[in-house]
Amino acid sequence: MSAANFQNFQLIRNPFGRLVFTGADGEAHEGVVPVRAFPIGAPDEGIALVNSEGHELLWIDRVEDLPENVAALVQAELASREFVPEIKRIRSVSSFACPSTWELDTDRGDARLVLKGEEDIRRLDREKLLIADTHGIQFLVRDIQALDRASRKILDRFL
């Protein structure tokens, strides 16, 4: 089902805080989850609502095409599940050998990550990096060139 037919479904939050999707057939699916197809490259395009078994119930081309109340529910659910701080500056690293502790400025405030190994830095494209810390938190560098010179110099030592 496509979101273009948004009159044919209902999405609500039940008293337990779970999303409930009711399709045109009247069948209610509790515990649906929005999943981004391209979480970094196009975060507001290509979102699937999937049921608890992982089956797609609804494909959403663009969040802004949804009715305002449904879009708000989808965005709130995505925000509660996703935590990918964006690195704005690398203040320091404890060592250029791994494991090393990095002191960061992110879009979510000051942070510290422990880099287990250089393989935990993944290049997404020429300008984007995804860095996983030992706790499984993913940190994003959206644009390497937008970082200050000192931060770029530190990153170069690990890349």
Image: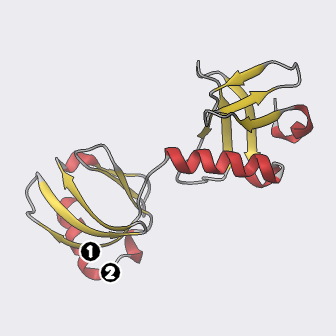
Q: Which mark is residue 151?
A: 1
Query: At 84% from the left edge and 49% from the top edge, which residue is drawn?
Result: 67
Q: Position of residue 47 (x, y in %)?
A: 66, 41
Residue furthest to the front in view is 15
Q: Nearer the viewer, residue 92 or 72?
A: 72
Pointers 2 and 1 in contact (C-beta within 8 Å): yes
Q: Which residue is mark 2?
A: 148
For the N terminus, the image quarter is top right
Q: Nearer the viewer, residue 84 or 14?
A: 14
Q: On screen, 25 above or below 104?
A: above
Query: At 42% from the left edge and 60% from the top edge, which residue is drawn?
Result: 128
Q: Is residue 70 left or right of residue 159?
A: right
Q: Is residue 98 left or right of residue 46?
A: left
- Amino acid type shown at disc 1: Ser
Identify the image's colour scheme: rainbow, by chain, secondary structure or one colour: secondary structure
Q: Is residue 63 left or right of residue 4?
A: left
- Distance from label 2 to label 1 (Cα)? 5 Å
Q: Position of residue 102 (x, y in %)?
A: 20, 63
Query: At 62% from the left edge and 27% from the top edge, which residue is drawn?
Result: 31
Classify mark 1: helix, strand or loop.
helix
Q: Position of residue 145 (x, y in %)?
A: 39, 74
Q: Position of residue 126 (x, y in %)?
A: 42, 61
- Amino acid type shown at disc 2: Asp
Q: On screen, 40 above or below 36?
A: below
